[in-house]
């Protein structure tokens, strides 16, 4: 009996999925650690107001960038995951690279045009920086392409490297900049984009893209996008556009200093759901061949979420002082609320990737649209009344609705859909 239980634990913690998850999680954890070092420097080298402006400009660029997906990358990732031939994978990567270049140029033009009106909308002074840095923003579609191709072909080791290398390059660049010619919001954000650009170009080369029969490949991607990718896009577009909406609304309703404080709190709670995202990425390819989520994946995920939340909340005062200095000590009241939101978000990850692996794009779309609307409406109502705590509770409400809908669609489709088998 004991030997059987030990064997079950061995399978749980040393299965291929667990090993890959540990590898990817290690890369993403290293990314978080470097990110904490970067945040520590940024919060010391920039004022709270400047740190808030830095997060506002980041939110604006990411907000716009999410439009330039169109379901292409989810479709491409699934094509890579389901193909049995390495040369076909490289052809799909080649087609996605061509599309990413076109989308990148379009993104640059859009951000440049937006720079002329953004200050009036957000009551900020970031328009000039957006205009100057808009060419570098063209890298975002290519960054997403690399991530989705590596996920699709299950290249977890490379994906783990790609998770932290841009941030590591960014850390080096800002230290050099600080010592050579000074530091500002524009320098901070420009070097962030430059680091992503440099590392992404290297990884595109490593993909060994095949551009032969490019028309046929583009037609294949177009068909998969139309049949599957667009459904994911319509849902995740709404979902992803809310990623940063809270910061934009805080900037508009309260100011840039509260954005800096809220961003610091979110940064501390992000690692809670980090393992969940790593696990979901690791099992994506395997989920295309099974009809239920293995129980061991669910147990592993929930165990991490609870443990990580406990560690953060018990050491919150120490973490805040260590990373952000005494100026940010007031964010401690936000952490329990945002930790609960992170637990809900992390729990959603396995269900979300399961639906995508099975081409249930309409389900992802419906869940994303409803929960994202809850998020936006909640932020509009709660921020004006309760300030930063209102934004945190809006996140709890949105991720809670997302979880309930995930469970509803999952069990409705599968019956009792959790199994102890892999």
Image: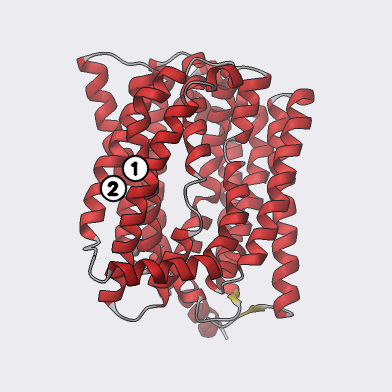
Residue 408 x %, y %: 75, 67
Note whether 27 is above or below 383 in the view shown.
below
**Left or right of 286 on screen, residue 389:** right
Q: Position of residue 8 (x, y in %)?
A: 52, 79
- Whether residue 14 is visible here, answered yes or no, is no
First in sequence, mark 1 or 2: give its number: 1
Q: Residue at x 63, y 33 (%)?
A: 246
Disc 2 designates what residue?
A: 200
Pointer 1 residue = 139
Q: Residue at x 56, y 61 (%)?
A: 230
Q: Position of residue 90 (x, y in %)?
A: 27, 68
Q: How many marks?
A: 2
Residue at the spot 53% in from the left edge and 42% down from the top edge: 270
Q: CA distance from mark 1 to mark 2?
A: 8 Å
* Quarter of the image where the N terminus is located: bottom right
Nearer the observer: mark 1 or 2; the answer is: 1
Is label 1 in contact with label 2 (beta carbons under 8 Å)? yes
Work out whether 356 lies above or below 158: below
Q: Residue furthest front?
A: 215
Give SS at disc 2. helix
Residue 340 visible here: yes
Q: Nearer the viewer, residue 64 or 374?
A: 64
Judging depth in this view, the residue of 53 and 159 nearest the camera is 53
Task: Kindly state the secondary structure of the residue where label 1 is placed.
Answer: helix
Point out which mark residue 124 bears: none
Image position, residue 43 (x, y; %): 44, 20
Query: Residue at left 58%, top 41%?
Result: 243
* The quadrant where residue 167 appears: top left
């Amino acid at each position: 009996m004991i030997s059987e239980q030990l064997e079950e634990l061995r399978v749980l913690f040393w299965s291929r999925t667990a090993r890959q998850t540990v590898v990817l999680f290690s890369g993403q954890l290293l990314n978080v650690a470097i990110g904490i070092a970067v945040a520590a420097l940024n919060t010391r080298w920039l004022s709270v107001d400047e740190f808030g402006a830095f997060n506002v400009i980041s939110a604006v660029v990411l907000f716009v960038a999410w439009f330039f997906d169109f379901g292409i990358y989810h479709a491409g990732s699934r094509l890579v995951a389901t193909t049995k031939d390495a040369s076909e994978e490289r052809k799909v990567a080649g087609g996605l690279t061509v599309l990413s270049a076109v989308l990148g140029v379009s993104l640059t033009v859009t951000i440049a045009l937006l720079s002329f009106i953004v200050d009036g909308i957000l009551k900020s002074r970031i328009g000039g920086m957006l205009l100057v840095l808009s060419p570098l923003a063209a890298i975002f579609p290519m960054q997403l392409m690399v991530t989705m191709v590596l996920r699709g072909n299950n290249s977890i080791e490379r994906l783990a490297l790609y998770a932290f290398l841009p941030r590591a390059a960014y850390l080096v660049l800002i230290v050099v900049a600080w010592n050579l010619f000074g530091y500002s919001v524009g320098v901070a954000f420009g070097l962030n984009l430059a680091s992503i650009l440099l590392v992404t170009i290297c990884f595109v080369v490593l993909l060994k893209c095949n551009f032969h029969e490019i028309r046929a490949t583009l037609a294949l991607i177009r068909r998969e996008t139309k049949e599957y990718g667009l459904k994911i896009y319509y849902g995740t577009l709404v979902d992803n556009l809310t990623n940063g909406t809270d910061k934009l609304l805080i900037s508009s309703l309260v100011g840039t200093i509260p954005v800096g404080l809220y961003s610091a709190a979110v940064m501390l709670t992000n690692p809670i759901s980090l393992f969940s995202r790593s696990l979901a990425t690791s099992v994506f390819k395997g989920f295309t061949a099974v009809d239920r989520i293995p129980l061991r994946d669910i147990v592993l995920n929930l165990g991490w979420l609870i443990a990580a939340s406990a560690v953060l909340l018990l050491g919150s005062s120490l973490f805040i002082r260590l990373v952000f200095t005494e100026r940010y000590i007031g964010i401690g009241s936000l952490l329990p609320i945002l930790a609960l939101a992170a637990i809900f978000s992390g729990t959603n990850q396995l269900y979300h990737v399961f639906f995508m692996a099975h081409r249930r794009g309409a389900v992802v779309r419906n869940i994303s649209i409803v929960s994202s609307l809850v998020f936006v409406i909640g932020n509009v109502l709660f921020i004006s009344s309760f300030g930063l705590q209102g934004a945190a509770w809006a996140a709890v409400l949105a991720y809670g609705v997302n979880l309930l809908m995930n469970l509803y669609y999952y069990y409705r489709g599968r019956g009792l859909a959790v199994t102890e088998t892999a």
